[in-house]
Image: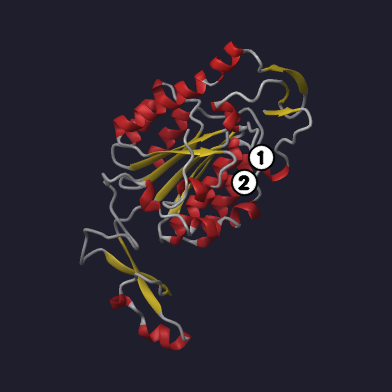
């Protein structure tokens, strides 16, 4: 659904549906995000890759080499590869017990709305792609669930680049898919619990319109043995009424000019539903020790999630 004032532009093109090329272009942005900053201090997951791990000795296996970066342990420099390639390379190791990253990207019917920047569904898949690149850059396995009106597409967590590209393709398809097979939030989170192994990092990206009692229960169950992060995607119009006036409303096929926002009572009631939904989600996250991050549709993921970026206030 779109809303625009006469004479003002509304989201078009890639703002309505993401393309694979657009998602691939977010690789640089993903490398600027530290996934560790998205996790609460109470970490239950088993660490792998560049993270500090409590495990030593057995279970540590060589994975690959990559170019040395400031902060890497000099003890793991691969001198043979460095001499052969004329550049310093370091060895990477992984543990049998590691922390995969599983992302639930909601591009369902309620996410097909936007008045600034892009649709919520596009913001969700862009966030999922950016965080996927952040996980891949940290040598984590990445996978998840792409939710759309056409149904659910699952991708087990894997580390190979070609699997990452398949996941990005699924995200792009979800943002443009049409149909009547949309799945509820509670069912999608329940599937996440089956897809995400114990100790993994599960990231839920949604507007959480489907946060009913069943969904709350499933999120609480998911958080029992996994590190969970919630990303609340919203449009600025949901949180605050637009300036007084008459607005065009469109569902993508038809347009009507029937929305008046000049009345004081209307403006006071405008954001009540959004604020109630936000507070219900926040209460759940506080209870379950889950980080909650807001993402506005006209805001970049780096701006919202990077430690040095300014975060939106939902």
Within 10 angstroms of label 2, few (less than 14), some, or many (20 or more) residues? many
**For the point 43% across and 46% down, which residue is it?**
102
Relative height, residue 27 to residue 278 (above, below): below
Image quadrant for the N terminus? top right
Q: Quadrant of residue 296?
A: top right
Question: Residue at 63% of width from left, 25% of height from top?
Answer: 242
Whether the residues at callouts 1 and 2 have beta carbons within 8 Å, the answer is yes
Query: Would residue 1 be found to the left or right of residue 256 on screen?
Result: left
Left or right: residue 17 compared with residue 157: right
Compare residues 268 and 113 and report the one nearer the observer. Answer: 268
**Would residue 215 be seen by someone viewing this image from the given angle?**
no
Quadrant in the picture for residue 236: top right
Give the label on residue 99, or none: none
Q: Is residue 194 left or right of residue 15?
A: left
Task: Report which residue position mark 2 lands on.
Answer: 172
For label 1, the crowd category at 10 Å Cα-Cα, with few meaning under 14, some 14 to 19 and many 20 or more, is some
| Position of 122 relative to 114 (above/below) | below
Q: Position of residue 139 (x, y in %)?
A: 41, 61
Residue 23 picture location, percent across and down: 60, 52
Taking the image as drawn, is residue 57 in sight?
A: yes
Q: Nearer the viewer, residue 156 or 280?
A: 280
Q: Picture coordinates of residue 97 (x, y %)?
A: 29, 56
Query: Tag 2's secondary structure?
Result: helix
Name the residue beneath numbered marker 1: 176
Relative height, residue 84 to residue 188 (above, below): below
Residue at screen point 26% across, 44% down: 42
Place residue 50 in its image quadrant: bottom left
**SS for tag 1?**
helix
- Nearest the viewer among 231 and 202 is 231
Name the spot of residue 305 as percent of width and height, x first: 46, 47
Instruction: Tell me how far mark 1 sits from mark 2, CA to CA.
Output: 7 Å
């Amino acid at each position: 659904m779109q809303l625009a004032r006469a004479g003002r532009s509304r989201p078009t093109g890639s703002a309505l549906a993401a393309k694979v090329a657009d998602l691939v272009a977010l690789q640089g942005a993903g490398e600027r995000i530290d996934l560790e900053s998205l996790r609460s201090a109470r970490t239950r997951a088993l660490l792998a890759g560049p993270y500090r791990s409590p495990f030593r000795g057995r279970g540590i296996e060589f994975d690959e080499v990559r170019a040395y970066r400031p902060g890497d342990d000099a003890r793991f420099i691969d001198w043979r590869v460095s001499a052969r390639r004329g550049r310093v390379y370091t060895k990477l190791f992984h543990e049998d017990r590691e922390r995969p990253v599983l992302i639930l990207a909601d591009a369902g019917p309620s996410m097909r709305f936007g008045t600034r920047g892009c649709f919520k569904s596009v913001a969700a898949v862009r966030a999922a792609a950016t965080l996927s690149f952040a996980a891949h850059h940290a040598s984590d396995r990445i996978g998840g669930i792409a939710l759309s009106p056409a149904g659910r597409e699952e991708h087990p967590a894997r580390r190979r680049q070609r699997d990452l590209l398949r996941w990005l393709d699924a995200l792009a398809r979800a943002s443009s898919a049409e149909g009547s097979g949309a799945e509820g939030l509670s069912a999608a989170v329940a599937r996440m619990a089956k897809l995400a192994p114990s100790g993994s990092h599960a990231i839920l990206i949604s507007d959480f319109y489907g946060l009913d009692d069943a969904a709350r229960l499933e999120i609480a169950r998911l958080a029992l043995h996994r590190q969970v992060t919630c990303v609340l995607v919203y449009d600025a119009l949901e949180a605050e009424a637009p300036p007084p006036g008459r607005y065009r409303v469109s569902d993508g096929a038809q347009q009507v000019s029937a929305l008046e926002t000049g009345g004081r009572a209307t403006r006071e009631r405008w954001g009540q539903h959004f604020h109630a939904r936000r507070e219900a989600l926040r209460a759940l996250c506080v209870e379950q020790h889950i980080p909650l991050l807001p993402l506005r549709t006209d805001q970049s993921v780096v701006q919202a999630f990077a430690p040095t970026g300014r975060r939106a206030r939902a």
